[in-house]
Amino acid sequence: MFSFQDYAAPATVEEALALLDKSRKNRILGGTAWLRMSNLKLHTGIDLKNLGLNSIYEQDGALQIGACCTLRQAETDPLLCGYCGGLVADGIFNIVGVQFRAVAQVGASVFARYGFSDLLPSLLACGASVRLAKAGMMPLEDFLNRPFFRDILLEILLPAQNGIGRSACLRNSAGDFALLNGAVYLDHADCRIAVGARPQCAALARNAGEFVLQNRGSLPVDVLAERAVLLASEELKFGSNMRGSEDYRREMCNVLMRRMLRPLLGKEEGH
Ligand SMILES: Cc1cc2nc3c(=O)[nH]c(=O)nc-3n(C[C@H](O)[C@H](O)[C@H](O)COP(=O)(O)OP(=O)(O)OC[C@H]3O[C@@H](n4cnc5c(N)ncnc54)[C@H](O)[C@@H]3O)c2cc1C
């Protein structure tokens, strides 16, 4: 179990940053579900609870999710449930159990960039950005591509969208980490496909998305999915770990892609 000698709940972002920068042994505390799995001996645990980062609200059609919102809050929030057909909220449902999701926080889940994250594919697919205390605003994709740096994640911003999306995951058993997960966002002008737990962190398969956009309606969904997987396999890396081999993941990506694309494109085929 991790431990810390001192606890602080700063009243401003500046104070929180100053504390974080004071020592490498000072850490931001999210819901501490992950931290509790470690034996870290920390100096100061920095609680962000006084910074007003625990709500989800709409501004000009865009949604803002405070970093301290719990996964459960995000999963059940009416605005998020309605956003892109529930794309973001649905991606959270498979994470452990309700009690766990009532503790773990969205900001920690994004900032930590876990390869297995079930949240990152949906956020990438809908074009999310992040707001950090030091580095400011940046697209989530840029954040994920940066080497790790110390900062505080304040908010996740979801752009106004009028399309729909779908997420899916494959697990060896419920409650385990995903062996593959993904999300698709689709509207008339855009198709964004993200695949995660490869086991590397979620990334966009741009060529696959472009292919689906260009060929929707002219190819059967299963053929679209099969070709999209081929393109995704060329542009994304797959690997092996205890949950599945590289080959198995490539094979399973086909299943994942069909599960995401069928409900989105099925109607266009008259199914
Ligand atoms: C047993 C177990 C199973 C899990 N299974 C899944 C799963 O199947 N799918 C999935 O997607 N996730 C899974 N997770 C991860 C989980 O969803 C959370 O992402 C994780 O617990 C981190 O959230 P937390 O609030 O507990 O963070 P904490 O443990 O409090 O923090 C984690 C790290 O993030 C840092 N941090 C926290 N908040 C911020 C912030 N605002 N800015 C900057 N840094 C910050 C902390 O300093 C720490 O280094 C699992 C976690 C556990 C422990």
Image: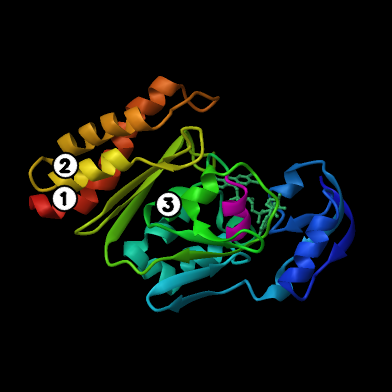
- Amino acid tagged 1: Gly
Determine the residue positioned at 79% across, 71% down.
10
Expressed as whole percent of the image width and height from the top left, the position of residue 165 reads 31, 56
Q: Sequence order check: which comes first, mark 3 or mark 1?
A: 3
Distance, label 1 to label 2, CA atoms, is 7 Å
Disc 3 target residue: 124
- Name the residue that disc number 2 marks: 221
Single out the mark in the foreground, 3 or 2: 3
Choose the circle earlier in sequence order: 1 or 2. Answer: 2
* Mark 2 CB lies closer than 8 A to ligand 1: no
User: What amino acid is at disc 3?
Assistant: Leu
Tag 1–tag 2 contact (CB < 8 Å)? yes
Q: Earlier in the sequence, mark 3 or mark 2?
A: 3
Q: Nearer the viewer, residue 12 or 239?
A: 12
Q: CA distance from mark 3 to mark 2?
A: 23 Å
Query: What is the CA distance from the residue labelled 3 to the residue labelled 1?
Result: 23 Å
- Residue 187 image point, x, y percent: 23, 59
Picture coordinates of residue 219, whole percent (x, y): 10, 40
- Residue closest to the eye, 81 or 186: 186
Q: Is residue 163 visible?
A: yes
Q: Residue at x 44, y 55 (%)?
A: 123
**In the image as oriented, which residue stretches furthest toward the right?**
5
Question: Does any atom of ligand 1 lie closer than 8 Å to the CB of label 1?
Answer: no
- Give the residue at mark 1: 266
Direction from residue 249 to residue 108 in the image, left or right:
right
Q: Is residue 59 above or below residue 160?
A: below
Q: Which residues are magenta?
A: 105-113
Query: Is residue 109 found inside the magenta-colored segment of the image?
Result: yes
The answer to whether 90 is drawn above or below residue 56 in the figure is above
SS class, disc 1? helix
